[in-house]
Image: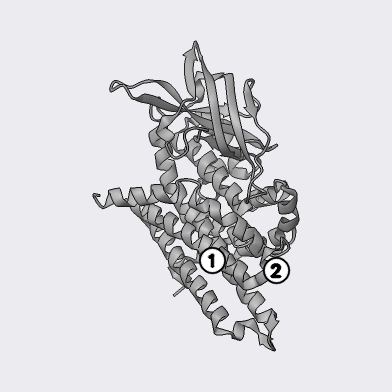
Amino acid sequence: MSEYGLSEEHQALTAMVRRFATEVIAPQIGDLYVKEEFPYEIVAQLGELGIFGLPFGEEWGGQGGDYLAFCLAIEEIARIDSSVAATLEAAVGLGSVPLMRFGTDAQKKQWLPDLVAGRTVGAFGLTEPDGGSDAGATRTTARLDGDQWVINGSKAFITNSGTDITSIITVTAVTGQKANGGKEISAIIVPAGTAGLTVAPKYSKVGWNCSDTHALSFDDVRVPADNLLGERGRGYAQFLQTLDEGRIAISALGVGLAQGCVDECVKYAQERSAFGQPIAKYQSIAFKIADMQTRAHVARTAYYDAAQRLLAGQDFKREAAIAKLYSSTIAVDNARDATQIHGGYGFMNEYPVSRMWRDSKILEIGEGTSEVQRMLIARSLGL
């Protein structure tokens, strides 16, 4: 039986992406990370390999794969670097998938081929400065003026929103009032460079330093009425569906980081000597690494389970929340332990574990905080 019961196609994909991550990403990402530069060449090469098109049909230039294949690629990349993995996850999960799922044929024909090929990346503007986890508290507005939407407001922490290859930013905005008095929230596609759209300078971040993240402001931004994505008033519901799937991908990212910590610690423990022998010979070190591997293994089975449920058309929301919660938690745990095992060297930027330590914390926050995941799991239990 293959490892984790993966198909031959999934195993071949995993091996290919792991080889690319090790041979292409690893040698250059440390320098890019310190310089806080977006990895344009790496993204282009991933596009050429078809990684941005994994879960899309061949009619759009995709690979005709499935969501598990996409998650496997994210995991393998995250074993080496989370910034690149996050770029891929956001570009596909937040940029392309909503367009594929909810877009019109005209919208897909206009933007999807370049997104699927990795020639461009998309972004999704949901979070607002005063909103955080309360995405329903959207203040950004969009009103129809003839055949155009006029958008005003602001967004925060938007990934892939300010690169040279960003093509679209789909934003949620209040477009009216529901019959019950609640906000009617819709999703609207805003092409990059549209007049009135201001991309703030990139954030100074603790981690994910090669990932592109900006605040956005909209000052009478005008786009065609046809840029409405999906149904009017269904923008929030559409995004919740997108988030459910995205949690599996973020879980895969967390597993990749956690496994990367194990890989680095096994290598370091065998090379580093103390008191006359490799530190791997000391039970305190060996057991710590064993615990790290155990966490990564259990987290991997959790996201595999959620992904398989999704592919089978079964309800997967609770399992996705469980996978995201656990994977993000153990990623932080493994990064902390990996830094400790490396001692003073773990605090030096030249060692990958220092990068992993800095990158791990955001996993407990992005795409639904750990508190939100616990809330979702509790609700699924009828609590």
Q: Which residue is mark 1?
A: 334
Q: Is residue 85 visible?
A: yes
Residue 4 lies, with reference to residue 43, above or below; the image says below
Q: Which residue is mark 2?
A: 345
> For numbered disc 2, what is the local secondary structure?
helix
Q: CA distance from mark 1 to mark 2?
A: 16 Å
Residue projecting furthest to the left: 382
Residue projecting furthest to the bottom: 276
Count of labels in the image: 2
- Across and down, in percent, residue 99 comes to 50, 36
Residue 341 lies, with reference to residue 257, above or below; the image says below
Dot 1 or dot 2: first in sequence order is: 1
Q: Residues within 10 Å of mark 1 (few under 14, many from 20)?
A: many
- Across and down, in percent, residue 324 comes to 44, 54
Closest to the observer, 336 or 314: 336
Q: Is residue 312 visible?
A: no
Q: Is residue 214 left or right of residue 363?
A: right
User: Residue 119 occupies which quadrant of the picture?
Assistant: top right
Colour scheme of the picture: one colour
Closest to the observer, 120 or 153: 153
- Across and down, in percent, residue 127 comes to 50, 36
